[in-house]
Amino acid sequence: MELVEGILKKDKRSAARLITLIEREDPKAVDALKKLYKYTGNSYIIGITGPPGAGKSSLVNELAKRMRAKGKTVGIIAVDPTSPFTGGALLGDRIRMQDLTLDPGIFIRSMASRGSLGGIAKATYDAINVLDAFGMDYIIVETVGVGQTEIDIVKVADTVVVVLVPGLGDDVQAIKAGIMEIADIFAVNKADREGADKLVTEIEMMLDLSQKEFLMRPPIIKTVATTGAGVDELEAKLNEHLNFILKEGLLAQRRKVKARENFMELIKFEIGKRIFQEKGQIIETLIDEIFEKNTDPYTAMEKLLQTIIKGES
Amino acid sequence: MQEGQTIRVLIAKPGLDGHDRGAKVIARALRDAGMEVIYTGLRQTPEQIVEAAIQEDVDVIGLSILSGAHNVLFPRVMELLKERGVDDILVIGGGVIPHEDIPYLKECGIAEIFTPGTPISQIIDFIKNNVKK
Amino acid sequence: MFDRESLKKLEQEKIRWESTTVKKVTEKTPERYEKFLTGSNLEVNRLYTPLDVQEMDYMRDLGFPGEYPFTRGIQPTMYRGRLWTMRQYAGFGTAEESNKRYKYLLSQGQTGLSVAFDLPTQIGYDSDHPLAQGEVGKVGVAIDSLKDMETLFDEIPLDKVSTSMTINAPAAILLAMYIAVAEKQGVSPDKLSGTIQNDILKEYVARGTYIFPPEPSMRLITDIFEFCSKHVPKWNTISISGYHIREAGATAVQEVAFTLANGIAYVEAAIKAGLDVDEFAPRLSFFFNAHNDLLEEVAKFRAARRLWAKIMKERFKAKNPKSMMLRFHTQTAGSTLTAQQPDNNIVRVTIQALAAVLGGTQSLHTNSRDEALALPTEESVRIALRTQQIIAYESGVTETIDPLAGSYYVEHLTNLIEQKAMEYINKIDELGGAPKAIEKGYIQQEIQESAYRYQQEVESGRRIVVGVNKFQIEEEPPKNLLKVDPEVERIQKEKLSQLKATRDNLAVKNALEELTKKAASSDNLMPAIITCVKTYATLGEICDALRRVFGEYKATVSF
């Protein structure tokens, strides 16, 4: 298996190609992923999310530079939304990571969310495993967070950084929308702007009022990605968080939750796919019947289950 | 390449000129044609372009240049691709490029050069008909 | 201007005309489009009458030439006194070659020089920098040190010509070199006239040749303002440029709005740096684009002039009328040139140049027909210059001032463009001014939207470009295009290493260290830069000395 060998030998082209096969749902990808799985679990996976324009890519750029300065290797996966109308996507995160392009210890992949309903595509999860097996010390997954994606990043990351900026107007609302629950660390980026302190106070208040019991209260770091201010501290907090979850046995716990989540996803995905492949016609007929009011969706579902269990077609 | 697969394109601006109107208009048009477009910004060296193309495993590299340095920078991109053993990426170019330079650029392996005034639909068709993967 | 009674009558008559005379015709032959648009997508009515300008107050809105609000022109006699400066942007290859071209242009009746620099020079790299590879001498002349600058202006008396230099990020350094060359010719700085573009904001937005981040860049600019107001009083310290914004795809309204918004930012920066508005504002100049939609462009220039006058008077409380005058250079629109049937470009350039003249420009560059293909040949440049001369001496449009004033359509468009531009400026103010709006990507996005819409209109055939999407022919590829000798790069590198071997390197080192020190202070940087250039420190070395303190700008906005 060329690709697997290549990846284990740290060949970037092999890794890049496998990610493409994953995105294309090529059966060859599954073969490779099977072989690679045992080599995964060694990377520290950081999720970075936040609203568009928060400066996430610039922050990732600065973080990665600092990690590299300490001799660590970094894989970066930047996920941007696919246009629901055309299926195309503009992936511009690399613009802010130009410094990293030629660094041998860095691998950057831009991914479009494609059809995935879950925000973080299944492909992203697999791509993380590829970079994990490749041997990256850190894997940073950057997603544009609006709604569901932000929550989904929990399913892949060991530590989640939520990036906010003053003056976007919807800060508090965004926090209410669920980011609160997933952030291990808050970064208030563009902190040289007016309103940064106010935003920090707002986040503090939210944390105070939260029903959630924190094992480690999320720290709030002020950063200015364009100058690098505060990024050292952010990096320190990341390592602190990692040490904390390692020490408390939380990392293992988290990863087990993640393994469950991802396996459940896989079950839903594969079983759904199978059923559509094999029972497509029956499903279409049932939809017609539901529409014509000849049956109801619940009875139809029971009928479908019957055919599956009995193996009828 | 199989029917229905998403084409990935790297739009790159080698050289020092900052005129990215064309590059950005093309990027958007390709996006609207259902492609995934990676844009890397201004002042990219051939080395950066090739490395990004490999990591992103793109099907197409679109090079845009208006400064007149195409005869140096385009062939350099092709040379680096070759050094890295990459032969399945379609490379196209555009910008203010004199007609008489085109044969040389094609000889170096650039599949097509699109000069100002080319309808974007023509570029999209060319990509769809010529991707190699 | 019109009495209520006759307007009412006119309105009734217009309705009658539309429902009878017009209707009869449109029933048989409908108009070509349901909606007519200007080149910038403003809606155009079938007919304009006094009804469309009924709010106009002659003295308030138009006034007289040379007087506030300068709608009709900034000089009392306009072209009856002196024609505009015919200034062809040129420069390529080595300083020797460019010097030859300048002498040729001057001998052909050109009245001012306009220097194009190559990209490494514009971005502060010497010719031997790895990123300069393939770019040396390509889009302009390569200048590495004062040596090259001495060659560039050899035998050209700097007290007799005015020189415009398209240089932005390293403008202070090139100006310092110009001052040093003049000194060697025995010409003192106060005798020098010319312009440096020096407009960094539009580089972040549209042109891309930036070096330093916005804050130190703005400081360099205000340092120049201050230095020149004392030592080089006839120098235009900035040319606030809408040209490139328009080239990037902006509409006429956006061109006016974003240029003046940048202008406001410079004025604010200078005031904040402690300068008095009437001390530097008279030396501000502007640079606009001239597109194909003749009447819209004329209206654009008039609207820009009136709007800037109001801004300076009302917002910045300028007292000196010269501070309120929008003086501008115009270049015809490079983006309208087609590679197909290139001779058609001569006609386009004529229309565009006419718009600039009817709009009251102070100087003009006409593009050459072959510029969509390569750098222009000498013959093409001559035709472009002749185009200006024919407008000046044969067309008759120069004999009276602002001849299109009073056209219902042009006055209506002037009002409309001013109003829409003001709306944009208000929006930009809300975002915290031009630098913040640029940082947020607002201005870039607005321009990109327009550029994309235009492209879609061309693709769909709604907008016709002759020879491109209609009236195409099979044609032979053009021949005899100008080629820059690839030897230039080698020659330039050789000169550079020779220079470094022969100059006083200790003096260079000391001067550069001093500059770095000054950069970290708040002192005016011009004197230290002049000292550096005189030691023959290279442009790249000087920029590096500044980079050490200022850092480099990185684009963060994508789409």
Image (spheres, coloured by chain):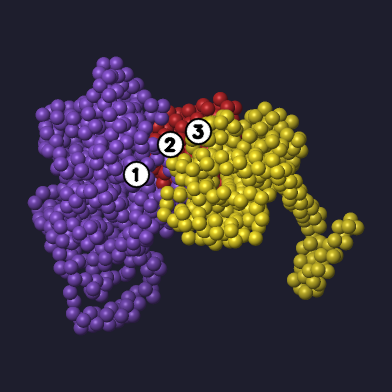
Find chain C in the image and tell me its colour. Answer: purple
* Left or right, A292 with reference to C448: right
Residue identifier under label 3: B48
The amino acid on which the numbered mark 3 sits, given as a three-letter code, is Gln
Q: Position of residue A39 (x, y in %)?
A: 73, 34
Residue identifier under label 2: B43
Q: Residue at x 28, y 29 (%)?
A: C514
**Front disc: 1 or 3:** 1
Name the residue nearer the viewer: B10 or C480: B10
Chain hosting mark 1: C
Find chain A in the image and tell me its colour. Answer: yellow
Q: Are marks 2 and 1 in contact (CB under 8 Å)?
A: no
Name the residue nearer the viewer: C459 or A152: A152
Quarter holding residue C221: top left
- For disc 2, the neighbor class at 10 Å (few under 14, some 14 to 19, many from 20) is some
* Left or right, C373 with reference to B57: left
Tell me if residue C191 comes above or below residue A177 in the rendering. Answer: above
Q: Are marks 3 and 2 in contact (CB under 8 Å)?
A: no
Residue identifier under label 1: C215
